[in-house]
Amino acid sequence: MSTGKTTGTEHAGPTGQLSVVTTATHGIRVISLAGEIDHHTGDALRHALDASDISRPRIVVDMRHVTFMDSSGINILIAAHCALSEAGGWLRLASIGGSVQRTITLVGVDAVIDCRETLRQALTP
């Protein structure tokens, strides 16, 4: 599969925190996360999800390397989903790991935000 034009930026915190790498593929912003999403690291995710400068923004969050997410992360994802939907775009979550998937399912995020098993599936219309 061709990934198209890719550009990227990286925002990495201290070890054990949250690493955020942003790229673009076929007009879709891909945010790859590694580490923990909590009230200490949430601003990095919030900043990466800001799509106010894009018309019809489409964002995929690759969560395969996220080891922990608390309610702060859930609130950030829900707020981003709402903002992107209002702008005529969308948010998808991809490759969610075991413990984070349980949290997402328990609070019902997967009923609100489109969750896909793989990054490839999340990039497919």
Image (spheres, rainbow, N blue to C red):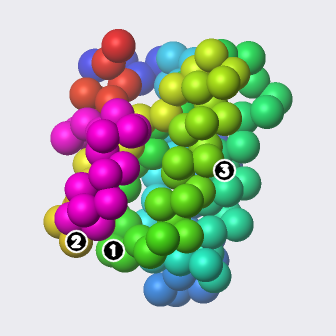
**Three-letter code for the amino acid on which mark 2 is drawn:** Ser
Task: Give the label on residue 41, or none.
Answer: none
> Could you say whether the residue bearing mark 2 is in a helix, strand or loop?
helix
Residue at the extreme right:
53
Which quadrant does the C terminus fall into?
top left
Which quadrant does the N terminus fall into?
top left
Residue with the mark numbered 3: 48
Are discs 2 and 1 less than 8 Å apart at CB? yes
Please tell me whether residue 24 is drawn above or below residue 108 in the rendered image. above
> Could you say whether the residue bearing mark 1 is in a helix, strand or loop?
strand
Please tell me whether residue 48 is drawn above or below residue 52 in the rendered image. below
Identify which residue is drawn at 36% across, 50% down.
109
Density class for disc 1 (Cα within 10 Å; few <14, some 14-19, many ≥20) is some
Residue with the mark numbered 2: 99
Q: Can residue 6 be seen in this view?
A: no
Residue with the mark numbered 1: 67
